[in-house]
Image (cartoon, coloured by chain):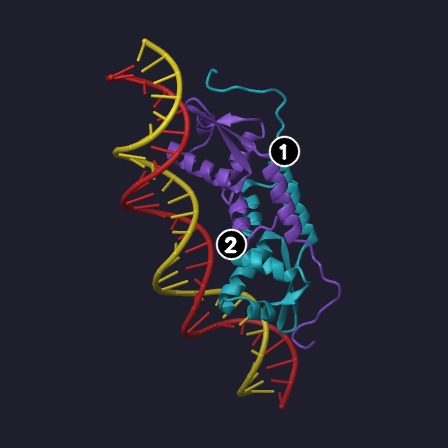
Chain colours: A purple, B cyan, C yellow, D red
DNA sequence: ACCTCATATTGATGATTTTCTATATTATAG
DNA sequence: CTATAATATAGAAAATCATCAATATGAGGT
């Protein structure tokens, strides 16, 4: 499963906004519907909806539709992918110390 | 070590741009100076410098100044912080299934 | 001291993102 | 089938971000 640079940016975009980080903290307590999240955030309903779309696109959050409601929760699989991704990106594979610039 | 929402966004901003992800891939081979990175990226020198600042601010990359050159490398400590951060944020601590909206 | 090379900073511009209001969609209740 | 409630989408404004050209800084070399 090789992710493109673009796909990686989509994953981590989830964590690049303070409101979205706050939404993760709310979801840590378990599944929440959009109206509950809206109650606890200082955002308009369309803005929350926009953030939830970005979170779902990242794979870190999943939405479950049930009647009128959409229930959101943290995806353990998405989290695993993100952690594996950051682990791989930050894994240094050097086998010798290379000097550049003719030092 | 409790990170604020704002601090978390600074960490993951590093991975929200395709060029910056590409820089990680280049740094996987070991320490590189800015001029080497510039050779391999389709960016102007000031733009690369701008990205390197964001990467260093995130803690995922460190810069080491030596004479005229700045050598950049991936920070294992920074990576550890980022992984711990995403692990904590995505850890669900629910102990009972809560239903909202009077279901 | 001057020149050159590597990198950083400034300032401007276009692109993207966040946010809102207004409206549309979809589901249930009466 | 109409009304209402929950969520999504469209469109516009404001803020932020990525980018570049020009310039500044700072370290060696001559």
Viewer-side residue, B37 vs C20? B37
Circles 2 and 1 in contact, beta carbons < 8 Å: no
Q: Residues within 10 Å of mark 2 (few under 14, many from 20)?
A: some
Residue A44 in sight: no
Q: Indicate the secondary structure of the residue bearing disc 1.
A: loop
Q: Indicate the secondary structure of the residue bearing disc 2.
A: loop
> What residue did someone put label 1 on?
B91
What residue is rendered at 63% in x and 57% in y?
B61
> What residue did someone put label 2 on?
B17
**Residue C25 point in image, percent of width and height:** 33, 30
Q: Could you tell me how far apart the alpha carbons at marks 2 and 1 are, in whole angstroms? A: 26 Å
**Residue B98 point in image, percent of width and height:** 55, 20
Label 2 marks which chain's residue? B
Q: Quadrant of residue C14?
A: bottom left
Residue A67 in sight: yes
Viewer-side residue, A22 vs A62? A62
Q: Residue D2, relative to residue A65: is it above or below?
A: above
Q: Residue A64, relative to residue A11: is it above or below?
A: above
Quadrant of the image containing the N terminus of chain B:
top right
Label 1 marks which chain's residue? B
What residue is rendered at 53% in x and 64% in y?
B48
Q: Quadrant of residue C18?
A: top left
Q: Residue A3, relative to residue B53: is it above or below?
A: above
What residue is rendered at 66% in x and 49% in y?
A87
Q: Earlier in the sequence, mark 2 or mark 1?
A: 2
Q: Residues within 10 Å of mark 1 (few under 14, many from 20)?
A: some
What residue is rendered at 69% in x and 51% in y?
B77
**Residue A79 point in image, percent of width and height:** 61, 39
Viewer-side residue, A39 vs B29? B29
Q: Report whether A37 appears left or right of C25.
A: right
**Residue A42 point in image, percent of width and height:** 43, 33
Q: Residue C20, relative to residue B26: is it above or below?
A: above
């Amino acid at each position: 499963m090789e992710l493109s640079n673009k796909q990686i940016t989509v994953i981590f975009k989830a964590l690049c906004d303070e409101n979205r980080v706050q939404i993760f903290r709310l979801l840590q307590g378990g599944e929440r519907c959009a109206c509950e999240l809206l109650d606890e955030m200082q955002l308009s309903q369309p803005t929350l909806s926009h953030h939830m779309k970005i979170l779902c696109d990242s794979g870190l959050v999943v939405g479950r539709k049930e009647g009128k409601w959409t229930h959101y929760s943290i995806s353990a699989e998405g989290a695993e992918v993100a952690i594996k991704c950051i682990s791989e990106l930050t894994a240094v594979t050097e086998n010798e110390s290379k000097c550049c610039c003719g030092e």
